[in-house]
Amino acid sequence: MDDVTGDGRTAPEARIMTLAARAFLADLHRAFRDRRTALLAARETRRGTMPRFRPDTVDIRYADWRVPPPAPGLERRLVEITGPVGRRMSINALNSGADVWLADFEDATTPHWDILLAGQANLYDAVCGTITHTSEDGRHYRLDPAARRPTIVVRPRGWHLDETHVLIDGAPAVGALVDFGLYFFHNALRLVVSGSGPYFYLPKLEDHTEAALWADIFEWAEEALGLTAGTIRATVLIETVPAAFQMDEILHALRGYAAGLNAGRWDYLFSMVKTFRHADGDTVLPDRQALTMSVPFMRAYADLLVATCHRRGAMAIGGMSAFVPSRHDPAATAQALAGVAADKRREARAGFDGSWVAHPALIETCRAEFAAVLGDRPHQIGTLRPDVRVSGDDLLDVRSAASAVTRAGVESNVSVAVRYLTSWLSGRAAVAIDSLMEDVATAEIARAQVWQWHRHGVRLDDGRVVDRPMVEELVRSTCSELRDRDGLDPAVVARAADLFREIAMGDEFVEFLTIPGARLLAAGAPLELA
């Protein structure tokens, strides 16, 4: 990146970390960082306890209340394309024809400071409509003037991540507040003038009090910039098991800011392993390929999400289709697209209002399946699900996933996790692996299952036991392929392997791979905000 200031700052840093933006971030942190710290401590006190529907919030669950109608640009969300905030991929997403672009600072972005700053600059240019890019091979990318641009919805990092490259009063900043604060400060007014607004996806929430913190942050930020109350809207990813027991409470806590809920499959399954980390071997999950949304406990989770959203007037957004089409294998691509169509057809018939895709080539397939069910309706909010009766036992019934753990399942998890971590440490957090666009969520469920299988000494369908020698053999084999066949940097491959061993084979379960992973990223001198 070019140094445009003469004082060592990169171009994105000079554009984004202005004096006014720094002051906004500092004030934002001083107002809310202590509550965030307290909420993380509260998470720790709940570790080891089984989630349940809270008796102290029963009035919220049974009262008659609704969230506001959809905000401008969020009235129709049949197809949402997800992806990182790199410059070329941002332009491709904006030209894709999707209804929404989830601009991701979380699972699809390596939290390297230069990458994060560049992402903020890219979003600024995207909102201005001036974003362009010329690749190393000379190809030029620009916004298609004839294309309808999707509504931008930004996903900041989860509450658990610090931003060590920014210090405020001598302490590391909160990653979520940095991502939210910079995007909001630079773009909110322009978005409102353009007929849209500052919209967000909120990841990794575990409790309605964490949503209430976001609501207070939104109120503070709107007042700071003079925006009308309720201009901000947020869609919450229900991707932790505790949050599945508090869907009503989370929507209620966000009050006038709530837009909807999303069903995040891989992160939810990762949270399921966390929930049962110290339970007996009967709670072990089978191969992740067998954990489809038709498995009873996953179907219960999805049905409860749809029923809750539509009772409250919120949008229910379905999960990711991560398939990446191949021009070199049209038969496999046709088969995979048929699977995508079936998955989206199931979601639409279950009542979802839209869904995610990871590649532009899937947009029309997704849109067609939802349009076949919705017709001219922009959503299904008026369609209630009185048939849904989901108990706590239904949500926690992992035994209903009656499949085996196989040698192929272990091999796949080790291979995908190590390969992904190698890319993540190299700054590429959205990676095509085996024709699927993978992000941190994939690596998390893959390494969590290996940890669970290894911890319990699970016996495979062929009689072998998952033990350390088996996993080490698979790690070495994957590393050898990455070095010898793919020609990747041996040092980066070695760091990825060591990180995998830490998060998949340690005595204690590591909460998030991104916490130890961030310590391995190159770090410059931190930016001190007085």
Image (cartoon, rainbow, N blue to C red):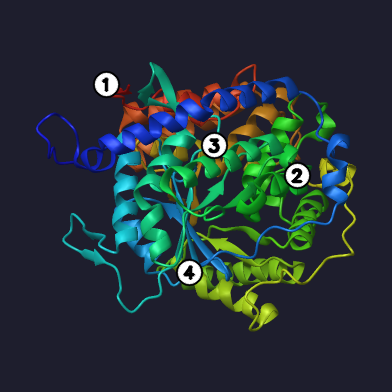
Give the mark toward the camera: 2 or 1.
2
Is any atom of residue 481 visible in this view?
no
Q: CA distance from mark 2 to mark 3?
A: 19 Å
Q: Earlier in the sequence, mark 3 or mark 4?
A: 4
Which mark is first along the chain, 3 or 2?
3
Q: Residues within 10 Å of mark 1 (few under 14, many from 20)?
A: few
Pick the front one: 96 or 253: 253
Instruction: Tell me, yes or no, whether the two marked residues, 2 and 3, touch with CB atoms within 8 Å.
Output: no
What amino acid is found at the position of numbered circle 4 in the picture?
A: Ala
Q: Which three-letter amino acid code belongs to the residue tagged 2?
A: Glu
List the single residue furthest toward the left: 6
Residue hosting label 1? 525
Residue tagged 3: 158
Categorize mark 2 by other alpha carbons within 10 Å: few (<14), some (14-19), many (20+).
many
Tag 1: residue type? Ala
Residue at x-position 29% and y-position 68% = 143
Q: Quadrant of the C terminus?
A: top left
Classify mark 3: residues with Cα within 10 Å, few (<14), some (14-19) or many (20+): some
The image shows residue 482 at horizontal and vertical percentages of: 39, 38
Q: Which mark is residue 98?
A: 4
Q: Position of residue 365 (x, y in %)?
A: 56, 74
Q: Which residue is mark 2?
A: 249
Amino acid type, mark 3: Gly
Marks 3 and 4 sit apart, C-alpha to C-alpha, by 25 Å
* 272 is higher (above) or lower (below) than 130: above
Whole-Å distance between the Cαs marked 2 and 1? 41 Å
